[in-house]
Image (cartoon, rainbow, N blue to C red):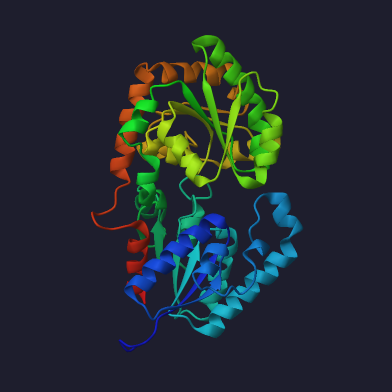
């Protein structure tokens, strides 16, 4: 390959979070290699950056056993179509972003059809939580794995996985949005509780009734509390309807700017398990985590998940600092009792804040670097 060869990169992102990672990677690649060209699959952000998608990302953005089963014929066609396009285009590198049930099947077909095509996987599957055998299998079709969490490279060493490098979580590029200024830090002294019931309809419908009773108990114990609830647009109507008859007024927040403003001023939070728990830790907001799924999902999870915690800050720290209440333990009594010391400022609050400082240290990337910039360097080095 000559030095003047224009880099051709095929990117596959299968859901909204992957689209956000993908657009940042595209920008970082262009900054280092202005003549780079892109093809593949992505969402709105990547399309605005110049990607002409092979097909709509909505075709493959599906989660859950039954939804996948219902759309299986289309998914199989899209897997074959994507792999065929990669082999036909002969890119310098294929970058797969998350969505492993789709992207890894594409990778396996491409590797078998043309082993010369380099394959990078951006975002490690949760092999450290369940299905650990996937790590070793990935060695056959992934040349380099880019990890978002600092413990993942060692996890892949232990499990016999592919070459893996920690490039940093995208939230590390948003610390200014998460951290309060001096005036906002003062507001954290007020009794302001942030409710985060999840971004899926099933999460919201299961957790909000428990959150309602939790808030009622909390107010009875410590007095008036201001309640803030950021709502994603597609669930705003549902959430507004569900909190209309709450005994305590709930301020519904719309949009990312209002959400992060709430992070910067909240005293504490009650949150569904998920990426938002890492946002809270980096924002230094003490919180209690809660989660409930249906009985079938709970039974499967108990059999296959290999962790003592499902909360990202706890997993990163290697100890259960943040209290979490799952399934039958997810009760208003438990949640309220755990929130009281966080709102009052007892020792439990100080313990969490000290632990969040350590999370911040563990997740740092080299000075002057960014997660997307580090990822771009590895992609170009692979080319």
Where residue 162 sits, quadrant-wise, is bottom left
Picture coordinates of residue 243 (x, y %)? 67, 28
5 vs 60: above or below: below
338 vs 76: above or below: above
Using the rendered image of the protein, determine whether residue 299 is visible from the camera's viewpoint: no
Is 139 situated left or right of 131 in this image? left
Picture coordinates of residue 40 (x, y %)? 55, 73
**Which residue is at the far right?**
70
Is 55 situated left or right of 167 in this image? right
Is 240 situated left or right of 277 in this image? right
Using the rendered image of the protein, determine whether residue 92 is visible from the camera's viewpoint: yes
Q: Residue at x 52, y 15 (%)?
A: 224
Quadrant (top left/top right/bottom left/bottom right) for the N terminus: bottom left
74 vs 171: above or below: below
Picture coordinates of residue 293 (x, y %)? 65, 36
**Which residue is at the far left?**
367
Q: Residue at x 70, y 30 (%)?
A: 242
Quadrant (top left/top right/bottom left/bottom right) for the C terminus: bottom left
Q: As rendered, which of 108 and 253 lies closer to the eye?
A: 253
Q: As rendered, which of 321 and 179 lies closer to the eye?
A: 179
Q: Residue at x 39, y 26 (%)?
A: 188
């Amino acid at each position: 390959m000559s030095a003047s060869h224009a880099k051709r990169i095929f990117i596959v992102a299968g859901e909204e979070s992957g689209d956000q990672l993908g657009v940042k990677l595209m920008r970082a690649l262009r900054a280092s290699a202005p003549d780079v060209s892109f093809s593949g699959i992505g969402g709105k952000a990547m399309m605005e950056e110049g990607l002409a998608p092979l097909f709509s990302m909505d075709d493959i953005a599906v989660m859950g056993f039954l939804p996948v089963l219902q759309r299986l014929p289309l998914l199989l066609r899209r897997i074959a179509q994507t792999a065929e396009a990669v082999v036909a285009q002969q890119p310098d590198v294929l970058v797969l972003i998350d969505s492993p049930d789709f992207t890894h099947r594409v990778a396996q077909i491409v590797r078998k059809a043309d082993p010369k095509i380099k394959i990078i996987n951006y975002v490690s599957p949760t092999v450290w939580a369940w299905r650990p055998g996937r790590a070793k299998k990935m060695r056959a079709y992934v040349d380099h794995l880019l990890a978002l969490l600092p413990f993942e490279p060692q996890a892949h060493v232990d499990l016999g996985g592919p070459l893996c490098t920690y490039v940093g979580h995208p939230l590390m590029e948003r610390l200014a949005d998460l951290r309060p200024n001096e005036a906002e830090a003062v507001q954290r002294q007020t009794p302001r509780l942030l409710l985060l019931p999840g971004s899926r309809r099933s999460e919201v419908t299961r957790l909000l009734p428990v959150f309602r009773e939790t808030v009622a108990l909390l107010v009875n114990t410590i007095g008036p509390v201001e309640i803030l609830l950021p709502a994603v647009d597609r669930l705003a109507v549902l959430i507004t309807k569900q909190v209309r008859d709450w005994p305590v007024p709930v301020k519904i927040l719309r949009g990312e700017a209002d959400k992060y403003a709430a992070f910067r001023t909240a005293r504490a939070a009650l949150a569904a398990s998920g990426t938002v728990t890492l946002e809270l830790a980096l924002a230094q907001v003490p919180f209690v985590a809660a989660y409930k799924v249906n009985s079938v999902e709970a039974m499967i999870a108990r059999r296959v998940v290999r962790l003592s915690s499902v909360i990202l800050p706890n997993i990163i720290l290697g100890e259960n600092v943040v209290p979490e209440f799952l399934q039958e333990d997810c009760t208003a009594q438990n949640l309220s009792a755990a929130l009281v010391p966080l709102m009052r400022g007892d020792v439990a609050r100080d313990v969490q804040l000290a632990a969040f400082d350590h999370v911040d240290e563990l997740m740092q990337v080299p000075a002057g670097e960014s997660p997307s910039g580090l990822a771009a360097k590895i992609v170009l080095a692979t080319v």
